[in-house]
């Protein structure tokens, strides 16, 4: 799917309340990981629901995700006797989201009242929401009791494992969970009478005085459809990953468009701006390394897991600059280091380098890994019998991509430094301890290690010496967004807030199109989708009460 397959953008200037083509109780805008549950929860409360999705199909970014969803104090945890108190949960997320304000002795752990309220809403509502989806056959799950949080070693994390759920019919690796989740929720929406309309791009709000009374949408055929809502409109349209202007102006780092659905263009920011909402978290995103040569492609999947033990990342000087097995949000930050001495981003593009061992034993087509099996798309892979020949190919490939990187190229000392970098890594690998970047020393790094050749008795399965002889392989990696996490600020019930903090009547938002209380942090695998499901649940109830 490309943006050519969806209706074109028009002005967001609001329309006055006049006649309607369709009238319903609740309108949900967006049919992905936030919109589908919001529509289902609203429908199960007895409301007539119209869901408008601008793409030709439902699913959005969620369709490409593994769809882990992070649910604190969930029922399987309680059944196992795992305590997950709100006070502990609050300190864990506060420590990561706002480390400079963190105060373990404060009632809000240093968070603002808004942030703490949003965190409490997640802790309170994620589990009831997950259970209701499962009970209604819309999202059945299996519990992953051993999956650790991304920062499970922090003393604040009193429940370091057990919060992750995945769709019940996802494969063992969990990589296809998003497709399974979208299938289940879509089928439930059809079964239970949600009026789903794809190919409908919402362009503007319809206002009745100071109340949001509905929306106008453009169909794939170019027709305008006016849908009015008796109770409210819930936006769940995703972030602004694929709007270059918004991404460049607000994120503050040279993040490339990542693996969010190609239709995530910041629609709600533009539409909601006409009614004066507060904005929040506009400078943050869910980050991920991405293959440079696939940036902007609809089929791009972020590098959630970097496979290979005899594998390293090196910068333009041929030097390692980071732990290759870090959780993806943290790994992505490496690319955005600014060098004030040279006035450049020296790590804007890193080279992933591996040998035949990793090619033979770590190839995978899951989780965006770049070491891929024979017969799959490997146009991003460079191969050469020697390191010098590989360096030449890397230079040539970078030259062909100069327009996308500001002319980024390898430094003159790359070839001279690379053998020493490999020698140093090989010594660490032989001893099982990465003295530079502590690779493989946390539980989540082992989860993200990917397939490797089994070696009996070794202390660190994330490392193995890189071969002293070719062939060698390489691919180009940069930093991108999974999606952004900023937009209009809402209260814990999804009500969009105006400049004075009062709810805008009739207007609600859920998911990556609104401000996230997570700040800079990515708390755990599924810490996007678990909270999203919680807020979809709460917004549906708030709209129902309107």
Image: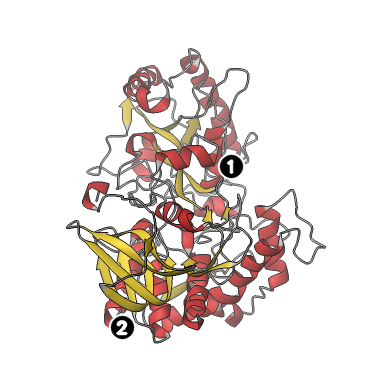
Q: CA distance from mark 1 to mark 2?
A: 48 Å
* Furthest-left residue in this view: 221
Quick one: 489 or 147, which is closer to the camera? Answer: 489
Quick one: 27 or 298, which is closer to the camera? Answer: 27
Q: Position of residue 126 (x, y in %)?
A: 54, 73
Q: Earlier in the sequence, mark 1 or mark 2?
A: 2
Mark 1 nearby-residue class (10 Å; few <14, some 14–19, many ≥20): many
Q: Position of residue 160 (x, y in %)?
A: 63, 64
Q: Which residue is mark 1?
A: 439
Residue drawn at point x = 54 percent, y = 70 percent: 71
Q: How is the image coloured?
A: secondary structure
Tag shown at residue 192: 2
Quick one: 166 or 354, which is closer to the camera? Answer: 166
Q: Is residue 505 above or below residue 337?
A: below
Can I make out residue 305 in this image? Answer: no
Mark 2 nearby-residue class (10 Å; few <14, some 14–19, many ≥20): few
């Amino acid at each position: 799917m490309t943006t050519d397959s969806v209706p074109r953008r028009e002005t967001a200037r609001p329309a006055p309340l006049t006649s309607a083509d369709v009238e319903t109780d609740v309108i949900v805008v967006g049919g992905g990981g936030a919109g589908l549950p919001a529509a289902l929860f609203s429908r199960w409360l007895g409301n007539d629901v119209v869901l408008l999705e601008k793409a030709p199909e439902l699913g959005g970014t969620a369709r490409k995700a593994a769809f882990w969803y992070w649910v604190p104090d969930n029922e399987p945890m309680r059944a196992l006797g795992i305590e997950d108190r709100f006070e502990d949960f609050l300190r864990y997320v506060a420590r990561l989201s706002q480390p400079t304000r963190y105060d373990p002795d404060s009632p809000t752990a240093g968070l603002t009242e808004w942030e703490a309220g949003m965190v409490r809403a997640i802790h309170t509502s994620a589990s009831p929401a997950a259970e209701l989806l499962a009970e209604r056959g819309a999202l059945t799950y299996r519990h992953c009791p051993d999956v650790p949080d991304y920062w499970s070693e922090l003393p604040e994390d009193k429940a370091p494992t057990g919060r992750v759920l995945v769709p019940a019919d996802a494969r063992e690796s969990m990589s296809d969970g998003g497709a399974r989740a979208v299938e289940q929720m879509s089928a439930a929406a059809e079964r239970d009478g949600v009026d789903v309309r794809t190919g409908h791009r919402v362009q503007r709000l319809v206002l009745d005085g100071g109340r949001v009374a509905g929306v106008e949408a453009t169909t794939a055929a170019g027709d305008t459809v006016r849908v009015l809502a008796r109770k409210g409109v819930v936006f769940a349209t995703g972030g602004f990953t694929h709007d270059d202007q918004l991404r460049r102006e607000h994120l503050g780092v040279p993040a490339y468009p990542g693996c969010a659905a190609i239709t995530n263009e910041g629609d709600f920011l533009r539409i909601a701006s006409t009614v004066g909402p507060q904005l929040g978290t506009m400078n943050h995103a869910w980050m991920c390394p991405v293959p440079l040569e696939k940036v902007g492609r609809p089929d791009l999947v972020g590098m959630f897991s970097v496979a290979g033990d005899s594998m390293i990342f090196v910068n333009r000087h041929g030097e390692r600059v980071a732990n290759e097995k870090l959780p993806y949000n943290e790994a992505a930050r490496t690319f955005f280091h600014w060098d004030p001495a040279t006035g450049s981003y020296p790590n804007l593009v890193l080279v992933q380098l591996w040998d035949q061992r990793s090619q033979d034993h770590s190839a995978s087509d899951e989780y965006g890994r770049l070491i891929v099996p024979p017969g799959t798309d490997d146009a991003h892979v460079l191969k050469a019998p020697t390191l010098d020949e590989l360096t030449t190919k890397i230079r040539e490939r970078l030259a062909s991509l100069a327009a996308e990187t500001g002319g980024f190229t390898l430094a003159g000392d790359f070839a001279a430094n690379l053998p020493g970098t490999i020698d140093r890594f090989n010594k660490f690998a032989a001893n099982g301890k990465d003295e530079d970047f502590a690779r493989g020393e946390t539980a989540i790094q082992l989860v993200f290690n990917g397939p490797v050749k089994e070696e009996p008795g070794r202390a660190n399965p994330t490392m193995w010496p890189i071969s002293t002889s070719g062939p060698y392989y390489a691919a180009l990696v940069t930093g991108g967004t999974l999606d952004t996490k900023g937009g209009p600020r809402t209260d814990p019930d999804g009500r969009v807030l105006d400049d004075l903090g009062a709810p805008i009547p009739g207007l609600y938002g859920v998911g990556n199109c609104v401000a996230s209380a997570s700040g800079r942090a990515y708390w755990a695998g599924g810490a996007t989708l678990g909270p999203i499901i919680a807020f979809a649940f709460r917004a549906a109830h708030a709209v129902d009460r309107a």
